[in-house]
Structures are given as C-alpha cells and as structure tokens.
Image (cartoon, grey):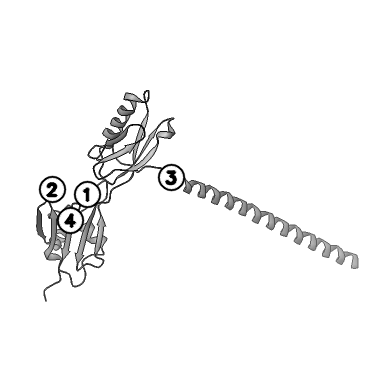
Amino acid sequence: MKQLYLFITLSFCFISALATAQDSSGGDGGGGNRSSYDSGASSSAGRSGVGIVVGENYVLKPSDVISVSVYQESDLDKSVRIEGDGSVALALIGKVKLAGMTVAEAQSLVTDLYNRDYLVDPQVSLLVVEFSPKIVHILGSVNGPGQVAIPPDRDLTLTEAIAAVGGVSRIGNPKSITIKRIDEDGRARQMEVNFTRIIQDPNAKDIILQEGDTIWVPERII
C-alpha cells in the first residue's frame, strides 16, 4: 500500500513539472513573436518618404522647401528653401528662379541646366519637402480665435475655417460675419456674409477663402 501511495505521489509531481515546463516554453514563444512584431513595426514606422505627394501642376512659391537629387550624383543632392525673390542656389548651376513654375516645369529646367554644361543625360528628381504656409485669420466671437492653414492641394471654405476654430461662440452673430481681403493690386475690400444662410440653405454657396483673409465674427446685439 505504501509503495502504491509513493508511486502515485511521484507520478503527480512528474506531471506537474511537465505542465510547468510547457507553460514556460509557450510563454517564451509568445514573447519571441511579440518581440519580432514590435521590431518589425518599429522598422516599418521608421521608414518614410522624403517628399510630399503633390501633382506636377503644383506651382512653387517663395518659402517652399524643395529637394533636388541627381541620380548617381549624390554630391549634387540638396534641400533648399525658395527665397523671397523666387530663386534657389543649386550646386554647379548657381541661382535658378523656380517660383511661379509648376513642379514639372522646374524639374525640366534644372535637368536642362545640368545637361547643358555639366552632366550627360542627368536624371533629376525635384520634390516638395515643405510648403510655404498659407493662412487666414479668424477673430472675434469664435471659440478658438487664431490662424487656420489653407491646405496646399485644395481650397479652404469659410465653413471649414469656422469649424477649425471651434465654431461661432454663444455670443457670436453668425449672420453678420465680415471678411477682409487684400486684392492682388494691394487694395483692401470687405465682404459681409450671412454664415447662417450658408449652413441652412442648401442652395447657398460657401465662400472660398484666400491667403491673408481676415474673418471677423461680431457679437450679437441684444
């Protein structure tokens, strides 16, 4: 009887030890998988493109930052901000005026300049790295007065701009919003807009804002 009891006890200890070893092995395997996943995710997150995706018809402006690279000519690669006069200084070819050109036109011009005197059939890539900031100002009775950036690849509407500052405040008058705009000839003009009508009337057209616009939301007259 004692021998049977000893046999059962040893068997129970053996089974318990085996189960513990399997659990430990399984936990290590899971941890190994997580480590591999985290490493892969980190590696993937660390990879990012250099330029911003824009259409070839995007027109370059002063304060845009561009990256110019020449295939197999790494000494000529350069990231540079377009100066106020619209020009950039590039290796070998010196100052080149690019503002006012589309990305495609600028890339073609730089390619021609390198091809003319310095390189044979150069393969030039020109990318926009950073856009010049285009902003509008929203002041008065809104929940978060300040600046709103105009997206580089599309228009900004008055509705989007008001939403970006948290909407018209409780004491604001959305029926009498004023937009001050400086035209290309330098003249200032003002527009009065019924924002309530824009929101509520399906046939009312939204206002397309322009760089430098100042929007003023007055208080309600009680």
Along the line of sight, the residue nearer the viewer: 140 or 89: 89
Quote the CA–CA distance across marks 2 and 4.
Answer: 12 Å
Q: Indicate the amino acid at tag 2.
A: Glu
Quote the CA–CA distance across marks 2 and 1.
Answer: 18 Å
Along the line of sight, the residue nearer the viewer: 22 or 142: 142
Q: Say which quadrant the C terminus sits in.
A: bottom left
Q: Position of residue 104 (x, y in %)?
A: 28, 34
Pair 2/1: label in front: 2
List the residue tagged with mark 2. Answer: 184
Rendered view: 219 above or below 188: below
Q: Indicate the amino acid at tag 4.
A: Asp
List the residue tagged with mark 1. Answer: 155
- Classify residue 10 as left or right of residue 147: right
* Residue 33, numbered label: none
Q: Quick one: label 2 or label 4, which is nearer the N terminus?
A: 2
Q: Quick one: label 1 or label 3, which is nearer the N terminus?
A: 3
Q: Indicate the amino acid at tag 1.
A: Asp
Q: Is residue 1 among what the camera can see? A: no
